[in-house]
Image (cartoon, rainbow, N blue to C red):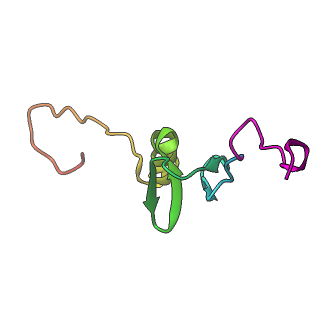
Amino acid sequence: MSYWDVPERPLEPPEEHPVGYCDHCGGEVYEGDTVYRIDGQCIHDDCLEDFAKDYFADCKEEVEVCVKARAWTDDC
């Protein structure tokens, strides 16, 4: 076997392929990435804050302060 018969090896390592996708942003998830599994959804670590705001949006409410004068009532 001569030098010319040996196949060339690639100079760069093989390209990684995603093992999944973030259900919030749609971005690729690779082996070794940190993700959260929430109700069966795969969420990037960087997407967690935005995901939580969307996920708990129905739980959000404003608190109203009721100042009572002199007599106690159940109106507030």
Q: Position of residue 37 (x, y in %)?
A: 45, 61
**Viewer-proximal residue, 52 or 25?**
25
Q: Is residue 5 magenta?
A: yes
Q: Is residue 28 magenta?
A: no
In the image, residue 30 above or below residue 40: above
* Residue positioned 49% across, 53% down in the render: 55
Is residue 37 found left or right of 31 in the rendered image? Answer: left
Is residue 37 found left or right of 29 in the rendered image? Answer: left
**Viewer-proximal residue, 60 or 50?**
50
* Residue positioned 15% across, 47% down in the render: 73
Is residue 50 found left or right of 59 in the rendered image? Answer: right
Is residue 49 found left or right of 9 in the rendered image? Answer: left
- Per the picture, the main secondary structure of the magenta-coloured stretch is loop
* Residue positioned 87% across, 47% down in the render: 2
User: What residue range appears in magenta?
Assistant: 1-14
In the current view of this chain or complex, which residue is farthest to the bottom?
40
Quarter placement of the C terminus: top left
Q: Position of residue 14 (x, y in %)?
A: 71, 47
**Viewer-proximal residue, 9 or 41?**
9
Q: Position of residue 17 (x, y in %)?
A: 69, 53
How many marks overall?
0
* Residue positioned 52% across, 42% down in the render: 47
In the current view of this chain or complex, which residue is farthest to the front?
1
Q: Position of residue 28 (x, y in %)?
A: 65, 49
**Viewer-proximal residue, 26 or 33?**
33
